[in-house]
Image (spheres, grey):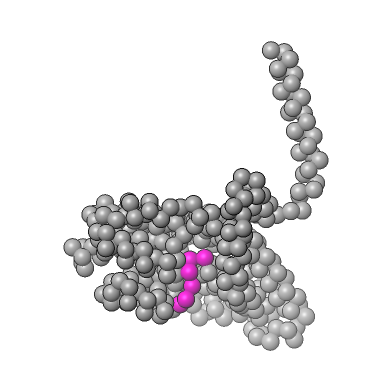
Amino acid sequence: MALVTESVQGVGRRLRQLNSQLRPLLAPLDGVWLATGAIFLGLALFAPAQLGPSAAFTLDAFLWILPFLIVSVLMAAWLKAAGADRMITAAICDQPVKAILIATLFGAFSPFCSCGVVPLAVALLGAGMPLSAVMAFWLASPLMDPEMFVLMSVTVGLPFTIAKAGAAILMGLLAGFTTLTLERRGVFPKVLRPKLACGGCGAPSFDEPKVRWAFWKDRERTWDFVKESKSVGLFLAKWMVFAFAIESLMVAWMPGHLVSQYLGQGGWSAVPMAVAVGVPAYLNGYAAIPLVGELMNLGMTPAAGMAFMIAGGVTSLPASMAVFAVVRARVFAWYLLLALLGSLIIGYLFQLILWP
């Protein structure tokens, strides 16, 4: 027994020595990049056949979202460098209802998926837009756009397509006005994580009150633009790559027949089941169209199909990871709760009104 104890203590000492030796080497490295590397190292060791497809999927997904990322980051940096956050504060913060309505309508017909909308939402929050308006845009945006409207009309019919467009607007309004109520009660005093916070209602970036759109004529503002672009861009990029690496595994190892098995039947119980499957699963709006059409042919009610498309469109595990990286824990929990409850409410509401 004493020999075993001594051996365990010896192993513990060696592990502590190894940790003390590796810590200075790993300290400069970012934990998110290390986690991403660990995913691909694990695939290389234990599932080499999946390494190539996951790497290709991650690269393709990141390249697809890169233009949105660049535009959003540059817009956020430009607004900060120009000192425009005060102007946005004056125009929007005092008119939250109008801001929510505009954000909902704009979001309901903008071409962003649940992951692609994250950088733009960060830019809007950093520029000073209230969380209520951004949340309305955030949750409405992935649900509908003009191209999706045409494809859905052909695949699942015009009535269902119009209903989903209405659901996108309803989700935005629900998210916006419930968030506004909590904002007025002081529930969300801070929204973005410290590294991303830049501006906001009553938080100007510069002592100089004047907005200078041509910021490059001022050395201090130009330097601020460069620092902001680099900081926010790298921060969002690493989390997007990590999220897409996780997403590649979900796409590869989440059998499609399980979705059909559990959602291919009608009934009131199908709505919460559809939400439970839709929220964590990766399912962009275009991929959901043929799947939901087939499930409805198998007997799933249109209401459950609607709940599944709303839940899968609003968020997913990769999108949730990206959101968690940029907002504080309380805001993230509210975001998930809105995705769950909003999908349930819309599913049951449409079953009561349109498809009893």
Q: Is residue 15 visible?
A: yes
Given residues 258 and 69, the one toward you in this image is 258
Q: Is residue 321 visible?
A: no
Image point 32% across, 77% down: which residue? 154
Given residues 127 and 168, the one toward you in this image is 168
Image point 63% across, 69% down: which residue? 198
Quadrant of the image containing the N terminus: top right
- The residue sitting at the front extreme is 49
- Compared across the picture, whether 314 is left or right of 12 comes to left
Q: Give the vertical position of 114 relative to 102 (above or below).
A: above
Is residue 17 highlighted in magenta?
A: no
Image point 70% across, 69% down: which residue? 230
For the record, the magenta segment spans: 110-115
Q: Position of residue 271 (x, y in %)?
A: 29, 56
Q: Quadrant of residue 220?
A: bottom right
Image point 53% across, 54% down: which residue? 249
Q: Position of residue 180 (x, y in %)?
A: 42, 66
- Compared across the picture, whether 86 is left or right of 346 comes to right
Q: Across the whole image, how many numbered discs are drawn on residues?
A: 0
- The residue sitting at the top extreme is 1
Given residues 83 and 59, the one toward you in this image is 59
Q: Position of residue 79 (x, y in %)?
A: 62, 78
Q: Main secondary structure of the magenta part?
A: loop
Q: Give the vertical position of 92 relative to 115 (above or below).
A: below
Is residue 113 highlighted in magenta?
A: yes
Q: Position of residue 188 (x, y in %)?
A: 50, 60
Quadrant of the image containing the C terminus: bottom left
